[in-house]
Amino acid sequence: MLPTMLQRLYTASDLLDGFNPFDELGFTLTRDFEVFRQFVSDGGPVPSSLETRLEQARHDATIADALKRFLKVGRPLVGFMGGHTAKRNSPAFADIAKLAWSVAQDGYLIVTGGGPGVMEAAHVGVAFSRNGMDDLERALAKLAATPDYGNLDDLFENDGSLKKSKRKDVMAARDWLAAALDVRSAAPSTLPVRLAIPTWLYGAEPTMPFATHYAKYYQNSLREEALVNNSRAGIIYGRGGGGTLREIFQDVERNYYAKDAENFTPMIFFDRGAYWLRSAVYESGKVTSYGLKLDEAVAEILKFGICSRLSPDEAALRQFLDKMAFTDDVSVIKDVLARHLGVAKRNMSFALAGESFRIPTLRMNRA
């Protein structure tokens, strides 16, 4: 087990202790990977014994309590959600990093799911947010030289040992992590506070080291709830797949039951390639142009939920839907977030004071 008995969130040093950039298998020597290997051995998302289930539940409860205490920093949280497959040398990665750099200038605390891709990009942006954009550009250029970490699916033999066929991929993960640590060392020594909420369900992915605090859970369901519910200032969605879609529709559910426009949490779909505004193109069963068109579907679902409960006039309905944006305009994004800032701070203060009944979004009527 990792040191949750310290009653705090993890740091990158906790998770990456044991990493050896000079060992071909150096990525697998971290304490983080050791816990992941044991997690798989114990049954993964379906623990093999009641004892293991209880031990994991105790760990996750300790993390949840540490997270609540951490959030007493009082800064509004903006979530950056998106896929783990965005390569470091892609425009999507750089765009998210630059957007996070800009959003951080307004004092928001950035939270992600703690993985690679879009999640890492957001943390890189915030890590350099006290520097000029030139420093961020140099960091992105260095990371782009190690764009991905190989294919880390199906790593283990039945006895828990690494498959020999995965050695090349494990070496790629080592190089990916070494490059991240090198770039992190160039960031300001006192880093802006940033939160990552990862899970050992996806523990094969190497831990990106750019966050200052990690609330790492065993159970992904608890992790997803922590991500979506604590992003009270709004959520920005970069391009992603199944995991991102789950988060989007958790957020849709929360806003579907919003009591009024004030408590509708901003949903911002960001991608300069219009990923969320166009459908994918296929040839012979293969995707030749990527996209997940959600603008009309999400708006229609939310309109249905709002109108079926509240019967607003057109002006009132527009107040809800104006807090949802499909855009790559940074000024529009910052304006949407700013309009919700007061409500986000108020509801966070209620949550931290244990006054949950005063938070309208927690009293959802599922009739």
Image (cartoon, rainbow, N blue to C red):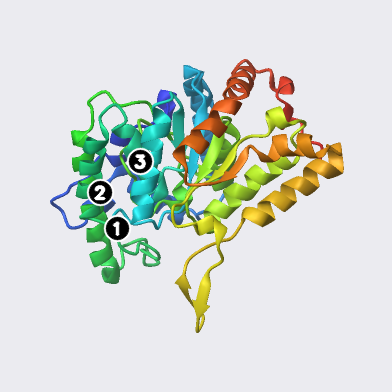
Question: What kind of element bears circle 3?
Answer: helix
**Residue 364, quarter of the rendered image:** top right
Q: Is residue 240 above or below residue 97?
A: below
Report the disc number at residue 149. 1
**Label 3: which residue?**
98
Q: Position of residue 165 (x, y in %)?
A: 28, 71
**Label 2: which residue?**
177
Q: Residue at x 74, y 22 (%)?
A: 357
Q: Residue at x 52, y 45 (%)?
A: 52
* Dot 2 or dot 3, earlier in sequence: 3
Q: Residue furthest top?
A: 353
Q: Amino acid at mark 1?
A: Tyr
Compare residues 294 and 82 and report the one nearer the observer: 294
Question: What kind of element bears circle 2?
Answer: helix
Q: Are marks 1 and 2 in contact (CB under 8 Å)?
A: yes
Report how far apart the C-alphas of labels 2 and 3 lie in the structure.
21 Å
Q: Position of residue 337 (x, y in %)?
A: 54, 31
Instruction: Work out which quarter of the rendered image holds the N terminus and state it.
Output: top left
